[in-house]
Amino acid sequence: MHGTHRILSLVFKLLPCIVATGAAAQQLDVAKIFDERNLLPVASMVEAGEYDLGARICDAAIKRDQPSVVWRLLRMRALAATGQTGEALTESAEFIKKFPEDLPLLMLRHDLAAGVGKKDIAKDALAKFNDAAKKKPVKDRTAAELVALGQGALALGADAKKVLANYFDAAKKKDAKAEEPYVAAGELALQKEDFARAADEFRKGLKEHGETTALRFGLARAFESSDREKADENLKRVLEINQKHEGALLVRAEQLMGAEKFVEAEAAIQSVIDVNEHSARAWALRSAIASILVDGEKARASRDSALALWPQNPLVDQVIGRCLSRAYRFAEAAEHLRASLAFDATHLPAKVQLCHVLMRLGKEDEAWKLADEIRSADGYNLQAHNIGLLEKEVAKFSIKQFDDFVIKLPERDWNVYGSRALTLLREARTVLCERYGLTLDHPVLVEFFPSQQDFAIRTFGNLGGQGILGACFGSVVTMNQPGGLAHGRNNWESTLWHEFCHVVTLTVTKNRMPRWLSEGISVYEEAQRDPAWGMNMNAKYRKMITDEEALTAMSQMSGAFLHPKSEDHLMFAYYEASQAVKFLLDKFGKEKFQGILRDLAAGKRINDAITANTQPVEKIEKEFAALMEQKAADFGGKLDWKQPTPEEVNPLDEESFAAFLKKNPTNRWALMKSADDLLESKEWKKAAEIGQKLIDLVPDDISTESGYFIKAKALRQMNQRDQEAELLRYFASRASDAMPIFLRLLELDTAAKRWPEVLANANRATALNPFLKSPQQSIAEALDATGQADAAIEAWRRLLILEPDNPADTNYRLAKLLHGKDDAAARRHLIDALVLAPRFRDAHRLLLEMAK
């Protein structure tokens, strides 16, 4: 760095001598040569974060009256990066005298002034810009000038799509290798939250122009909500180029805040403040952290620092509000976002964020109005557009209002599973509120969405969120429709219980609990309601603990939810969190555990709350880790889990494999291969024996690769139905998502008229997909057969809504049950049955009987 400075200083000293010995034309040529040779390395300095040095060199060049305007642009940017925006604006006034028609210079002066609330300067710069823009035809402008024209047009309120087409795209055609058009187009897409378009723009820019922090930083933000791995990769590249990059450091700080690593987040923020002590965004983030940690004095002081240069800066409260919203502190977030809009009623980022916060507070009518305002002001805003589409869909929903719950869902859904959902919610409210000492004095809003897209917009504010079944925001629960996303694989009843548990614990702690504890309690409470709903040790988790060292310290556990390596790692985070909750409850008891929650509500941090109510968190973490390692060791402790090498066995050679199995009779790989081979060769008895051996070695394994599954397959082929049913019933009692098992048991038990078992497994199946006709029919038949007439009537009606395969029989059964209870309704169903099947003899007989 210092060598570069000395070289440039020498050039500056020699320049007057060289200039003095030549003619005027030669002087201009020398100055241009100097600019051509030195602008790029100085720009690289600024790009790399050497702001002070870059600013000084630019100042020296400007004082020597170097002809390129780029020296002035670079100096302004370097000064602004170090918090000297006032000085940059003062100097830019002089620069404009020399370059009165330079569009990028005028636009930069406007942007810097607008960024610190100097409205008069910004207005004057924009007026000068507008005048200068008229001096030359657009077709004769350079790429940089076209970009500036587009930015000026946006500042004057032009349509974003027209700006993209007429200026930014035109700039790319003018100079495909220029960086500015791609950065400008990408930033505009980010402002409108069109992340896919933004990513495309920044990627094209990197391909055409090459590496720059602006392009990489833009790409990182474009991927932030959809692909965290790519976002992190691009953020890392930015900081490799410029370790002082304010934007990248603050995005990193927000990521750390999301993982509840507040000390590390503070360090990233301090790195920014060390360079730019007036960074409003940095101070706003510091205020948000203080608010999350319930340090009101520090929160207010940091907010005051953020507003020091511009007391009415809407960005400050918008940033604080956004961060508080992510921490589930929605009421506080709304206050800050309203404060932002009080400073500037047109500040769209605050309006968009407030719209989402209002949705999460259950104030949907207010949110719809706000979204409409956003669309009117900005037709390109995708989030506002999506919320408008959501509003149209929700308007079609049926609203069921009760004292304790408000349920919104399509009318057909209410008739299929609505009453069941309400019954479960009321049970959860009774059990969990009592357990955690909570009195809920208001109804909880629960919404079910048949479209995953609508669920995502309602829940996350944009598309995505595939695989997520439900969400809770305090007193608002959103759910994917049972039978919709991942139907047949996920239990909607356990999900609903899980989410309502969040309602309770978030309310008890005033939304001040870490994510791992919130999720851990909900998963733990699922298992308390029904052991089959809980999460248990399995082969994957065992391997992650013993081979991958995937255990996370309790104090860092929330981070496991933020950056999971895979779907399996995310599920392991849920499992580990639930086991941590169980450990605390088992070791210290309910009262101590609830003391932790009370301390969180009072503002204590989780580690301090745990230590205050139990023992030092470091000791707890060691004990918990030892417990989990022991659980992993005990799971299949008699089993040999080693995967053999090719040198040990050739799986394609029968003799080699037989010899390996004989030598290693408890090897899991060998036993599983043997079972597969025996099933394929239809040696059912031997396959059943291998299945039983696996059951004996790993009795807690209830996966589809378990001995239970293998043995059940073999028993089915041997037509040993009673033994098969007994085995499958044990399996079904411990698994909440075993749809093939539930359906097979329905087949076996219906044939044997074991109606209590039919009812149990039909309910399990419809807890996975209530729209599946066969288990709904099984429920109706079982209730009918056991004389539960009223419940049977409701069940047959549900089946009728689902368009059964034999609607005539369904109508007949309803008519038969309703006869004597509601003859008018019975007659209607009977007529429907006869219209569908005119020769239905039983229906004719019932009609004659009713006519007597």
Image (tube, rainbow, N blue to C red):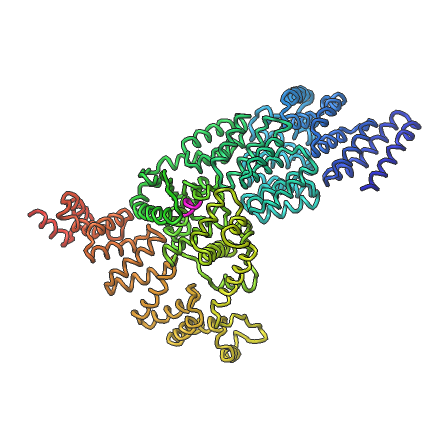
Q: Please provide the residue range marked out in magenta.
A: 501-505
Tell me which secondary structure the magenta stretch mostly adopts.
helix
Residue 262 at least partly seen: yes
Measured as percent of width and height from the top left, residue 202 is found at 62, 40
Residue 210 at least partly seen: no
54 with respect to 491 (left or right): right
Q: Does residue 503 belong to the magenta stretch?
A: yes
79 with respect to 586 (left or right): right
**634 or 698: nearer the viewer:** 634
> Toward which corner of the image does residue 41 lie, by quadrant?
top right
- For image coordinates 88% across by 28% down, the residue present is 26
Note whether 524 is above or below 11 in the view shown.
Answer: below
Measured as percent of width and height from the top left, residue 195 is found at 55, 40
217 with respect to 74 (left or right): left
Q: Quadrant of the N terminus?
A: top right
**783 or 378: nearer the viewer:** 783
Measured as percent of width and height from the top left, residue 852 is found at 6, 48
Note whether 67 is above or below 774 in the view shown.
Answer: above
- For image coordinates 34% across by 71% down, the residue present is 715
19 with respect to 370 (left or right): right
Query: Which residue is the extreme one toward the right?
Result: 21
Measured as percent of width and height from the top left, residue 582 is found at 45, 57
> How many discs mark residues in the rendered view?
0
- For image coordinates 55% across by 36% down, the residue present is 296
Q: Does residue 280 belong to the magenta stretch?
A: no
Note whether 746 is above or below 215 in the view shown.
Answer: below
